[in-house]
Amino acid sequence: MSIINVSDDRRSITLLSPTDMPAASAFLWNSSMMMQVNCRGYATAQFMQPEPAKYAYAPNLEAKTFMQPEQPYYAHHPGRFFYLKDLDTNELFSAPYEPVRNAPDSFEFIARQDTIAWKIQKSRLSIEITLSLSPTRPLELWQINVTNLSEQPRRLSLVPYFPVGYMSWMNQSAMFRPELSSIVCSAVTPYQKYPDYFKQRDFKDLTFLLAESFPDAWETRQSAFEGEGGLHAPSALHQERLSNSDAIYETPTAALQYQLTLQPGANKQFRFAFGPANDHAEIASISNELFGSETGFDEQLLAYKNYLKQSESPLKIATPDAEFDDFVNHWLGRQVFYHGDVNRLSTDPQTRNYLQDAMGMSYLKPERTRDALLRALSQQQRSGAMPDGILLSESAELKYINQIPHMDHCVWLPVCLSAYLDETGDLGILNQPLSFADSDDSLTVQQHIDLALLWLFEQRDHRDLNYIAQGDWCDPMNMVGYKGKGVSAWLTLATAYASQLWANICQDAGRETEAKQFNSNADALNAAVNTHLWTGDWYARGITDDDVVFGVPTDTEGRIFLNPQAWAILSGAASEAKQASMIDAIERDLETPYGVQMLAPAYTKMREDVGRVTQKHPGSAENGSVYNHAAGFYVYALYQAKQPNRAFRLLRQMIPGPDDSDLQQRGQLPVFIPNYYRGAYREYPRTAGRSSQLFNTGTVHWFLRCLIDGLFGVRGTKEGLKIDPQLPQDWPQASLDRHFRGADFHIEIVRKPALKQTSIIVNGERLADTIIRSIDTGKRYSVTVEVP
Amino acid sequence: MSIINVSDDRRSITLLSPTDMPAASAFLWNSSMMMQVNCRGYATAQFMQPEPAKYAYAPNLEAKTFMQPEQPYYAHHPGRFFYLKDLDTNELFSAPYEPVRNAPDSFEFIARQDTIAWKIQKSRLSIEITLSLSPTRPLELWQINVTNLSEQPRRLSLVPYFPVGYMSWMNQSAMFRPELSSIVCSAVTPYQKYPDYFKQRDFKDLTFLLAESFPDAWETRQSAFEGEGGLHAPSALHQERLSNSDAIYETPTAALQYQLTLQPGANKQFRFAFGPANDHAEIASISNELFGSETGFDEQLLAYKNYLKQSESPLKIATPDAEFDDFVNHWLGRQVFYHGDVNRLSTDPQTRNYLQDAMGMSYLKPERTRDALLRALSQQQRSGAMPDGILLSESAELKYINQIPHMDHCVWLPVCLSAYLDETGDLGILNQPLSFADSDDSLTVQQHIDLALLWLFEQRDHRDLNYIAQGDWCDPMNMVGYKGKGVSAWLTLATAYASQLWANICQDAGRETEAKQFNSNADALNAAVNTHLWTGDWYARGITDDDVVFGVPTDTEGRIFLNPQAWAILSGAASEAKQASMIDAIERDLETPYGVQMLAPAYTKMREDVGRVTQKHPGSAENGSVYNHAAGFYVYALYQAKQPNRAFRLLRQMIPGPDDSDLQQRGQLPVFIPNYYRGAYREYPRTAGRSSQLFNTGTVHWFLRCLIDGLFGVRGTKEGLKIDPQLPQDWPQASLDRHFRGADFHIEIVRKPALKQTSIIVNGERLADTIIRSIDTGKRYSVTVEVP
């Protein structure tokens, strides 16, 4: 049993029953690294050089793999641990919990914006551990404070143990360097083709543990540290002192030993830095930065805190739902900013992700959105087609999934741009000239986007339905149309919606002819979907190369997909009757206690005319999971369909907890929204709801947009700020602070059931309609919104 | 403390002090898999589909990596374990040792040709475990026998625990299938490019543990099995019964539970099979084969034993050195056959390895050598160049190191062919017609080899030295000549030696003109090496692109290399005076208690004009290790130089043990010769001598050839069997049995110090010279050899 504590700027878990340790995690990042830390002490981290790399490895394999945050934990999982041994009683404890797994007397795991911390008591010792990051470097900053709560002096041995793992089959070693007060573990990134050597020779292949306090002893050999005792009772800790040995082509580790005596009430603090480096000079420079002056370390902590100020939520809300407020006010902006700031630490983000991550950034740093749009469009083909990924550096190249052609990338240009224009009104961007990836022709942004949407409109079959080829939004649905015939209902509807968004922007820019043309294109696409893909109850997902319509009531697996329904609302294809029918079907077939599934029933075996998604485990990833990104589209559509209660219910489900049963089932603290929760609730209730733990997801941008365009209805338009809240029925009021076009708005929404329609009072004056016009930069607006 | 037992057909370790468990391993293979098993119970296995694959994984990563047998062991290392719990005392033990690590009362680890076994006693229980393989399938066959040695009935819970690990991030699950009496774990090999799906869909992605006896309970979830207890005290074993749960997108495991009561003296046997399968039907078929009849399982064991009969040593020897005899008589042929039979379980063996593995096969199955030579030559380029790897199947392609061009592959054609002709006298092969990889021209084998050696002779610089380009024999010396200028002393000498071998064959085939030409080429090459690369004390290793001679007395690292010295003896480049000088230098600078290093001092940092080898850890792999393959060349050369004492001393060092201190230092039983022992003895004595544990090595072919052409001097010639032993000085006699060209020879060698020269008595008749001519198929020859 544990309880989750929510306070202004932190989330924490307090264990009531220490034998029931959850697997909840939190994450930190800076511009060069990211790190996921589990409350047990397990941790994985990646940094860029320039592709993602690791500096602490698993014990057996040096493989470069992606983060895999849902991976199983086990004794040798990478982590950061502090062994503490009472030299009088020989009692051994490890903080925060692993690997000894001795139950603490009290335990709190605390996620803040800029730190992850633990407060633990055990055998009348108090142990406080805090992790933060450098603002810029791939560097972990650790503090541990041990306090004697008893009435006797305590003789203790403290051993910070930072396993480094199997670095390289080619070259690995470690030694303590007294002049650096560091254990330095070295490895070599292997190459076979000699040109790769020149790319890799400046890599940060060293891993170091730098200590402020010179240790009494150390061990650098993983196997000698563990010995026959095992990590829960390391042989090395049976000795009075660690061996001070080097590791010579032996798996390195970093364990330092401090012998200390604490008088009653006394405490002692230790500080460490852990990370990769290129050479000893770099470690010396870091050491000087952190410990060369009294304030160096704290200055770094402050600088990191300041860096994160950029990620403050663009909305500060107060509603009857305190948990919801806390998540929106403290955690949502952070996750949105993370995506837009570091692009999921990739060098070739998928175009779809890149544009949606930029969309969310419209509400925090709109100038970054502008840059991203221009960068993406400058990599467009002259034909209008967008590439599968956007290259962020000279040396970047398209890798993995970005080598598989997907058909939907053009869709996201007007989707991103419309959010940016709503927020900024910056129509000037449309006339910015840009060249192409394969042509020096210089066309304006609006000409680029015309080309993109015309290219997309051309990719249709004889029925006016968009070809899916090897995939659209749903990455792994890669065999529907690889022969060149299959079509996608979602992509056809998305093309229609994107065309309408673009028509609206054309209209605002005074391009009426183009506006008409794109609206007419959208009508043709909507009509085609209604003709060929309405099943009677909902929209099918598509038609395969062999002319099989799928996602239909007669399918036993993959009967109904969420995306075509959501986007048929957005594009206006679905009549009110059709909307009602499909919303009913979604409630019956896709909704679960943990959110709305992306498709159901999940596929349990390969369907060769659909492809990779059907090979994923039922309930996982895109195969019948509660895929929050798709759920976000649907909630956004529900606000468009004026379904405030249903919309808020589903939006709310994306946030985990905070009750213990939800923590135990989802395995996650409410500090981020994961890309999915396990689905297949009807088939596998035992595991349904489990968090993927992956914080890379476009979900958060749609979550934020749902708040702005839907729930609170504080959306920008060409004319100003349009106010049109859709509070859930049971909320009598809500308030929010919002910065918009240089001005600050404090908005109080109150329910007046007697009213016929929403009415707005700004700085004491009641408006004639619901738009606040002619906004003055720097001014503060006090707004009261009366809703029926 | 442990002792090593050597008996006729097995090697075993008996532990005297059970707290000092070594890491010794043994290996088994069949035509579709190989498996390395450690005495603690750790195990790794690979099978072909068609590329090497795994069916039991590490817990955290699904990465496909090579075997890495020297990797560190840790609690979650893959293995096969049998937990045994006394239900009356609750005492928990695991056999053979891991993961509980409770010291056994007695412990024996036994490697035989066809089985790996343990005999253990603990708390008055006797536990015998035996592993064998299917003769053809990737399938492990396990037997465990538990006997009650006490005077009371014993109530026991036996839990075979075969961890399967993290199979796939995409799809993994497990369940017990009662109709198969098996735990079946399923995974999906992921693809991103859809054509890969069609290559992978018939993969054996299931892993199963099949039990002869239906279990009382089971657990399929790794995390639930381990729980908070850890593998040394699994939480699942605190319960009376395992949970019988399925694993649903959870890391699978295979744990079965048997409750049994054994009366005093009673015993019970359990049998299992473990391996990969494509579908349930395949598991059912295996189940029927093994357990469908009373004799099925034993028939498979016998069939595997029979398969291995092919690997019997081609020499049976009796010398004053019993350990040496045991290794040669029981283990050497097995390792030679392994290479020639399954080509290290690769689909594109390096041409160099393929031809040397075929060379060793000359002494066991010469028809296989013939096939390999013809296959290799049929993949030759019309220019004469040989490819970097030989493709063994239609779908195979050159991968990894075989994408890096190496210059030496042609050398190995006459090296392999000369051994084959010595053994068979099959000069007919020379007239076999063959086409080329890039041409349908049909030329005879001898024309092919003419082309190969002329091509090699053309690859010279203005000094008549052979270009090294991106590498020669030593794979990772890849930056000496990548700009097209650098040259190799070794390759020049190897070209000279290969040309001489070929000249001799031409001579035997009556091609005197060609013989003269190739001998003259060899002379030119030898002269060039003597002119440009003799340092005064030894031969340098080469000259870089930038005209730096390296491997010379003024180098502080990589001063002296073994290979140029060895091959200067073989090619005749080295005068007697030069031989004496360099042999002295080798003894001083390269010899160690564990063998002779390939270079010294080992590089400690990257030398950019040499390349990859200098990035390897000092003392490991090719960087200053005791690289047995190179040592084998040198020993072969020492026999050529008539240095029998020195040659035998170095040959003998390749075999580990059998004393305990050697076992502890090298970490290996004398059941195979590893590719290297750690070197850098002068710099890192603590770790020097450690076995790489890798049984893939061309060493064994040269070891065998040293016995035949050198130590016992029983080499074939065109005329017959030439007898010319070079026993070490302190051997008064030796005897051997040898099968040669269809006849059996029993040869007794006796030292007669009074003699001036060797004298041969065959079936009672003294020969005029040392060649036994006109050998009759099927005849038995009794030979006495009197040596001075």
Image (cartoon, coloured by chain):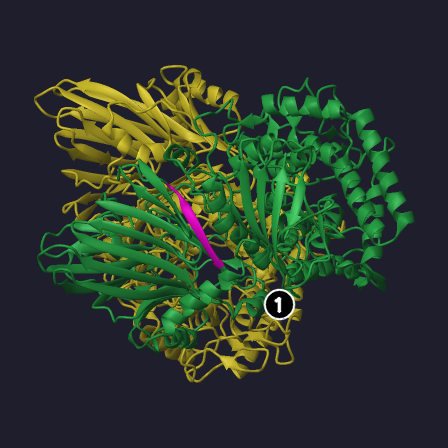
Chain colours: A yellow, B green
State whether residue A356 is above or below residue A473: above
State whether residue B110 is above or below residue B680: below
Q: Is residue B460 left or right of residue B238?
A: right
Magenta stretch containing residue B45, yes or no? no
Disc 1 marks which amino acid?
Phe
- Could you tell me which chain the residue with mark 1 belongs to? A
Find residue A692 and report its horizontal and vertical position in percent.
37, 55
Residue ranking furthest to the right: B513
Span colored in magenta:
B23-29
Find residue A94 and report its horizontal and vertical position in percent.
24, 35
State whether residue A549 is above or below residue A708: below
Find residue B339 and report its horizontal and vertical position in percent.
57, 53
Q: State whether residue B204 appears in this view.
A: yes
Q: How many marks?
A: 1
* A722 and A12: which is toward the camera: A12
Q: Quadrant of the C terminus of chain A?
A: bottom left
Q: Is residue B764 left or right of residue B547?
A: left
Q: Is residue B240 left or right of residue A364?
A: left
- The residue that appears at 22% across and 50% down in the rendered structure is B121
* B39 and A393: which is toward the camera: B39
How packed is label 1: few (under 14 Cα within 10 Å), some, or many (20 or more)?
Answer: many
* A752 and B123: which is toward the camera: B123
- The residue that appears at 57% across and 35% down in the rendered structure is B648
Quadrant housing residue A121:
top left
Tell me the element at label 1: helix
Magenta stretch containing residue B24, yes or no? yes
Find residue A414 and report its horizontal and vertical position in percent.
56, 58
Magenta region, mostly helix, strand or loop? strand
Q: Which residue is mark 1?
A: A518
- The residue that appears at 42% across and 51% down in the rendered structure is B8
